[in-house]
Amino acid sequence: MLISRLLEPRKTLQVVAGPRQVGKTTMVKQVLTEISLPSLFFSADGVDADDTGWISDRWEEARVQMRYHSYEEFLLVFDEIHKIKNWSERVKKEWDTDSFHDLNLKVVLLGSSRLLMKKGLTESLAGRFETLPMGHWTFQEMHDAFGWNLDQYIYFGGYPGSASYVSNEVRWRRYVRDAIVNPAIEKDVLLTTFIYKPALLHQLFRLGCAYSGKELSFNKMLGLLQDAGNATTLVNYLEVLGESKLLVGLQKYAMDESRKYRSTPKLQVFNNALLTVMSDGMTYEKAFTHPDLWGRWVESAVGCFLLDKADELEYQLYYWRDNDEEVDFVIVRGDSLIAIEVKSGWRQSNSGLGTFREKYHPQYTLVVGGEAMPLEQFLTGDIESLL
């Protein structure tokens, strides 16, 4: 899709956005080798955050290249540009200058979805950009690239950079913590958002990952966390973690919006690697050989898949419960309503689907992991075909 957009007439900035370690830079570099456009690629990683002139200097280098070689069009790529203070204002100035002079200089920006969307694009560059979201890698992608089987994907998640370390689980955990978790918290969250209690956010993240796939009320969270303050603080911090594509609290599906907001959240990681890394004492052998444990990993993996598609397909993801009856996931897009129950080792019953069907009349109800929809078939299928 990026190639086709770059071959179109210059209209908007192209923003490749997504969480850390999902291959954004690698993908863009591959695109540069496949298209015939002359280009320059710059990374702001390591550039002084106060050096706002760095952007203009690199932009001018691209203009000089165009003039010197009489290029009719040119491509300028900035990676990690959000690390420069007030980057969006400088990009706006240079982009508008080129637009005024009809200079066919196309631009691609790379960065985390939250930083780019919240801290610059919507504030300064409204109407000047299109996004290309990149999510965590799916089972199909990990299988095609690394030969992973379904069980490996469920346990180790979808970070391609970590694939070479899975034979040594201690090393793999260290890589995920050092290369993904710590930078995501310390740089993508704490350096861009005012967090009154950083230690609490760390605790909430760790707790939420370990409880992925489970409902946990904010009152219970307050009892499990040290110096937790109040529920409002936890709600806000969970929203920040969700924006950073790390951890989210799914709301209970209800017709009344206020009931959704007040509901007990069902915690869900965006990548099952986070569940594994934050589960103390867990090993692949232990999780795989205990049906109750493995069932949690399976349900969380389905949640990861559905969360990853939510932005792309523009749907909302919920869960549903009425006393002891429940539905693991509920998809809503416009008038479309889909109920999904995960059949796994820790819970075989799916009686909640019948009650939900009678009460809300969804277009589709699915039992994932059953004979009609095996787990592997679901994780390699097309959710959009049901919407």
Image: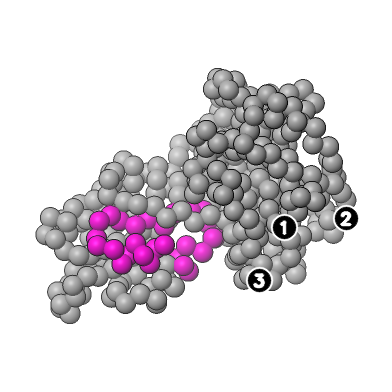
Residue 235 belongs to magenta span: no
| Residue stretch in magenta | 1-27
Q: Earlier in the sequence, mark 3 or mark 1?
A: 3
Query: Picture coordinates of residue 282 (x, y %)?
Result: 80, 52
Of circles 2 and 1, the one toward us is 1
Q: Quadrant of the C terminus?
A: top right
First in sequence, mark 3 or 2: give its number. 3
Please indicate whether residue 204 sits to the left or right of residue 239 in the image: right
Query: SS class of the residue under badge 1?
Result: helix
* Identity, as a three-letter code, of the amino acid under mark 2: Thr
Above-or-below relation of 31 to 193: below
Q: Which mark is residue 103?
A: none
**Which percent across, then down, holds residue 245?**
54, 47
Q: Residue furthest left?
A: 101
Mark 2 sits on what residue?
289
Q: Quadrant of the N terminus?
A: bottom left
Q: Is residue 24 magenta?
A: yes
Residue under label 3: 146
Q: Identify the residue under disc 1.
A: 376
Q: Nearer the viewer, mark 3 or mark 1?
A: 1
Q: Earlier in the sequence, mark 2 or mark 1?
A: 2
* Quarter of image, res 122: top left
Which amino acid, by three-letter code, is at mark 3?
Phe
Whether 274 is drawn above or below 201: the answer is below
**On screen, residue 300 above or below 236:** below
